[in-house]
Image (tube, rainbow, N blue to C red):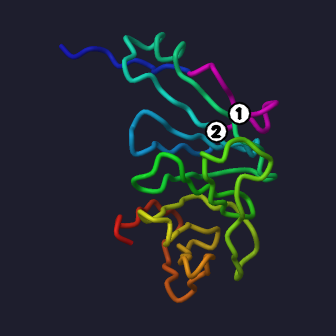
């Protein structure tokens, strides 16, 4: 007979929110090393979680997990993704903006600059993906399309000619080479 499924382990070293309305975690993303992940929530914070590699059980995971909270970006956050091959660069989708975040820069009220975007009213960016070098970024917008940005020189420029229709729901990933 198979073992009964467990309900999991609640990590208590950090949390999202200051009350019921902003306490929801809306997205998580695992780092390529599989021992870290970030969570984002309606409170506007990014939390980086580092799991112990040699945990002996669920209680040990909770006791030894380290969490670092990164400064509030000023909007609700809905999605996150790691840059393939990097444990320190993520993109975060919020209510109005998509933010590129370098976790090595440490805590602060502004983690990074939002991507330039025109074309629709601001709303939640619910799914994101980066290529290996963060030179191409894709995001599912509130208009049921995937929008793209490409690194050109020192900045990122929106690529409206690459836009894809997705229907109501979208989950996707960029091929690591772009």
**Residue 122 place in picture, x, y as percent:** 75, 69
Viewed as shown, does residue 78 lie left or right of 59? right
Q: Which residue is mark 1?
A: 16
Graded by Cα atoms within 10 Å as few (under 14), some (14 to 19) or many (20 or more), the crowding at tag 1 reads many
Residue 22 position within the rendered picture, expressed as x and y whole percent measured from the top left = 77, 38
**Who's the residue at 52% across and 89% down the image?**
161
The spot of residue 27 in percent (x, y) is 58, 45
SS for callout 1:
loop
Main secondary structure along the magenta-highlighted residues: loop
Are the residues flagged by discs 1 and 2 in contact, CB closer than 8 Å? yes
Which stretch is magenta?
11-24
Quadrant of the image occupied by residue 145: bottom right
Q: Mark 2 Cα within 10 Å, few/some/many (few <14, many 20+)?
A: many
Q: Which residue is mark 2?
A: 25
Q: Residue at horizontal 50%, vertical 65%?
A: 134
148 lies left or right of 18 = left
Specify whether 6 is left or right of 112.
Answer: left
Q: Secondary structure at mark 2?
A: strand
Please tell me whether residue 14 belongs to the stretch shown in magenta: yes
The residue most toward the left is 1
């Amino acid at each position: 007979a198979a073992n009964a499924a467990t309900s999991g382990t609640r990590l208590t070293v950090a949390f999202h929110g200051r009350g019921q309305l902003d306490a929801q975690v809306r997205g998580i993303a695992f780092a390529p090393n599989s021992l870290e992940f970030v969570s984002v929530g309606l409170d506007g914070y990014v939390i980086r979680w580092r799991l112990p590699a040699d945990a002996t059980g669920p209680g040990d995971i909770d006791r030894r997990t380290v969490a670092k909270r990164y400064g509030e970006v000023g909007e609700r956050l809905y999605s996150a993704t790691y840059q393939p091959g990097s444990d320190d660069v993520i993109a975060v989708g919020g209510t109005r903006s998509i933010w590129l975040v370098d976790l090595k820069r440490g805590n602060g009220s502004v983690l990074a600059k939002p991507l330039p975007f025109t074309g629709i009213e601001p709303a939640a960016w619910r799914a994101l993906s980066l290529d290996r070098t963060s030179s191409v970024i894709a995001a599912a917008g509130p208009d049921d399309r995937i929008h793209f940005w490409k690194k050109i020189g020192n900045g990122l420029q929106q690529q409206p000619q690459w836009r894809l229709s997705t229907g109501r729901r979208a989950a996707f990933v960029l091929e690591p080479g772009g």
